[in-house]
Image: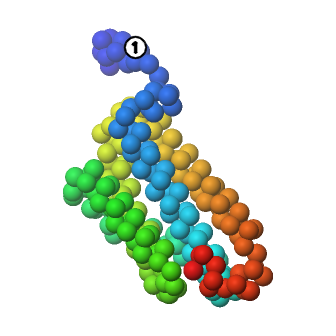
Amino acid sequence: MTELALKAVASEKPATFRAVLAVTEFRALWSAELFSQLGDQFARVAIAVLVFQRTSSAALTGLTYALTYLPSMVGGLTLSWIGDRYPRRDVIFAVDLLRAALVALMALPGMPLPVLGVLLAVMTALSGPFKAAQLALLADVLTGDHYVVGLSIRQITIQSAQIAGFLGGGLLAQSLSPTMLRTYGPSLPLS
């Protein structure tokens, strides 16, 4: 590096969480990620609770929850090209709008479990193009150390949303005991 380049690097302020969160476009991306992760996790837990409510099978409930991660992986492998082929902001917006519509369909009362499973699988598979577009856009919005800190904030958000989803699911399961689920069955608001 030349002396001028070294001085320019030395004069830059170190990236902090505050500095990264001060970037308006990053905050918008981060908010979208936060709500997307919270929604995904809540949908996973709600479907697992619904499966237990309707089947009383702990094994089927656990399998249902575990299988919610497979479409996410498959969607990442097969659909992430969409995030590169089309304008990134448009992909993020369209995918989240489509995922919201799928969740609205899942919330319809009396929806059969197989249909709920397919809707959940499609919803989680669509996270592939969302994440591809988001990460590519993040590299345009933040550079250098700010990008690294932005990735850290994103990872903290994902892990916190998972913990919040487990906590919310635990509270939901605690408030709806297995005996209550078997006794009242489909009359509960979950179905």
* Residue at 75% from the left image edge and 68% from the top image edge: 174
**Quadrant that contains the C terminus:** bottom right
Q: Position of residue 150 (x, y in %)?
A: 45, 38
- Does residue 171 lie above or below 181 as drawn? above
* Residue at 40% from the left image edge and 18% from the top image edge: 12
- Residue 147, quarter of the rendered image: top left
Q: Position of residue 41 (x, y in %)?
A: 55, 63
Q: Within 10 angstroms of label 1, few (less than 14), some, or many (20 or more) residues?
A: few
**Quadrant that contains the N terminus:** top left
Total label count?
Answer: 1
- Does residue 57 lie above or below 5 as drawn? below
Q: Position of residue 72 (x, y in %)?
A: 45, 67
Quick check: 19 left or right of 5?
right
- Residue 52, quarter of the rendered image: bottom right
Quick check: 153 left or right of 2?
right
* Amino acid beneath label 1: Ser
